[in-house]
Image (cartoon, coloured by chain):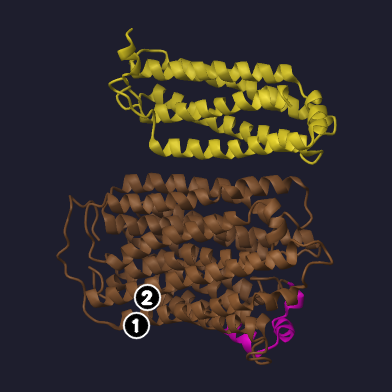
Chain colours: A brown, B yellow
Amino acid sequence: MKYESQRVAMPYFIFALLLFAGQIVFGLVLGLQYVVGDFLFPEIPFNVARMVHTNLLIVWLLFGFMGATYYLVPEEAQTELYSPLLAWILFWVFAAAGTLTILGYLFVDYATLADVTMNRLLPTMGREFLEQPTITKIGIALVVVGFLFNILMTALKGRKTVVNIVLITGLVGLAVLWLFSFYNPSNLTLDKYFWWFVVHLWVEGVWELIMGAILAYVLIKITGVDREVIEKWLYVIIAMALITGIIGTGHHFFWIGPPEYWLWLGSVFSALEPLPFFMMVLFAFNMINRRRRNHPNKAAMLWAMGTAVMAFLGAGVWGFLHTLAPVNYYTHGSQITAAHGHMAFYGAYVMIVLTIISYAMPIMRGRPYGNSNTAQVLEMWGFWLMTISMVFITLFLTGAGILQIWLQRIPESGEALSFMATQDNIALFYWMRFVAGCFFLGGLVVYFGSFFIGGQASAAEEVRGPATEDA
Amino acid sequence: MTDQSLIQPPANRHLPGDLAVWMFIFAELAVFGILFIGFTVARSLDPATFHAGRDVLHPWVGLLNTIALITASYLVATAVHQLRHREPGSQLRLWLALAVSSVYTAGKLWEYGDLYSLGYNLGTDTFFMFYFFLTFFHFMHVVLGQIILTVLAVKVRRGDYDGSDMNGMESGASYWHMVDLVWLVLFPMIYVLA
């Protein structure tokens, strides 16, 4: 760690991981509710558990992105953070607001929550993923503005690097697109448009910039490959992400009432959305093959390769599976969507945050060459357990989805099974998904365990050539 | 020239421009390729609509645009040649390419204005959806190409390029030729064969 103020990333990472654990627990609750419908009813109904599961994901990834930014921007800019105090204040504000919101979901019924948070003054609640009370949404906006101010002031006074520019562009995009969550038109088609401007343009637009920048930073650090080479890759990847991702939003417009041409535009452009993810795979493996040093933090390298591969499979391949309009006509909103959502979020965004945590946490804990061998082995066990479990979760949900489409969607009306009758027929897949989910939790426990093993890796790294930048 | 020399690759063969630009070019060609396939499939499903749509277009403007883009590409190719051999005239050719390609942008804008005033737009039918989207998407690429040509011309004028490092010039020229190539498929596909 070159700058003391980078350490402010630590509370963000720790809190992110705690929320991650919460997300997984609620995921298991949901997985069981799929097959044991009244499990925990009426205390935690399905809709509440789902809201907590998805909102925890979004909030912990935001904590992860912020931690990553606080860690890498000062080092890239070669200067201390503009205000570590502001970063600490915003951490506590965001943590308190996030916790209160989740507790609100769990302990107050949603209508009461809307009432006590004065949703009527500016109604924004009630939409999937954007369920947060308006006051929480305003809080998120203010925290992000303060965060961006801090980061921009840091970046502007120091060295300007492509990694910083791409990361900050992504974060500014994240903040600007968030503003659409405050617009809630009564026309349902318009409402869906603006809703996707947040949801889609986050995960298939600006978040890809954030992911690309973090991946590029970690690759520079662990491979020692020339910055110029990595920056060139980053430029091409983000150009592809934006070209395909922005018009690719159209794949959400197929059935919400806009003009027919969206069937074509959405299909064609989103069919190419796997490209930037495929290039990230080539990028990560190429840079690691051309590495000029063998960094002793092997776990971080595994996460970096893993995130590229899993993002390509989850976001790229599983996205393409159902993105063409003639296919989506049958698959829309089926378990295929759930399969894609799980692997895409895990591969692209969970794993990129775990990559930077794997690289940065040991350094912040005074282990510049990474954790001890035992800790790394345990962390890699966590990696494989979680990743393989997620592959199985995705495969079982895909199986459930295919059967669901076969029984419920493809037959002519009158012959098709009802929604609930179909669910009974695919219950076996849900049970298998639940078992895979339990293994995922096991992997998470192993991963957390790796943080409690002392010692550090040996400084004796085998340098393959003159390294350009320090670890 | 013997048979032997025909199959021997040139000794100093290299990829013109940067590999990153070529990845970009292939991705762009993939986008257009899928759109072309979509156009062909949609046309085979509804030939009458496509035929009626084509009759409204102005093939002479399309032909003029084709000549403009081919001429511009010739000028760009020779500008690269001049720079590589450190001969004068590279800068002038780039400015000329920019001027000639403006015939295309003007022609396209005129046709859009004409069709729009007749009441045609993106939502008219499948043919006009493809016509407006494909050609406007290509139009945006031409505009980006013109910006790149301007940057190249300015860099040659400032002496940033002296012919020793051709990477920037070749990358920009490769992109421009891609834009030209796409139009060479677009023009017959939309204006002639539909």
Give the labeled residue for mark 1.
A449
Q: Residue at x 32, y 65 (%)?
A: A300
Q: Position of residue A109 (x, y in %)?
A: 70, 87
What is the chief secondary structure element of the magenta stretch?
helix
Question: Given the image, on which type of amino acid does mark 2 rest?
Answer: Gly
Q: Position of residue B27 (x, y in %)?
A: 51, 40
Give the labeled residue for mark 2.
A382
Element type at marker 1? helix
Q: Residue at x 49, y 16 (%)?
A: B75
* Looking at the image, residue A311 lies above or below residue A419: above
Name the disc covering residue A331, or none. none
Residue A299: say if magenta.
no
Rate crowding at label 2 as few (under 14), some (14 to 19) or many (20 or more) other CA atoms within 10 Å.
many
Q: Residue at x 34, y 74 (%)?
A: A381
Closer to the N terminus: mark 1 or mark 2? 2
Residue B107 appears in view: yes
| Stretch of the chain drawn in magenta | A100-123
Q: Nearer the viewer, residue A33 or A280?
A: A33
Outermost residue to the left: A460
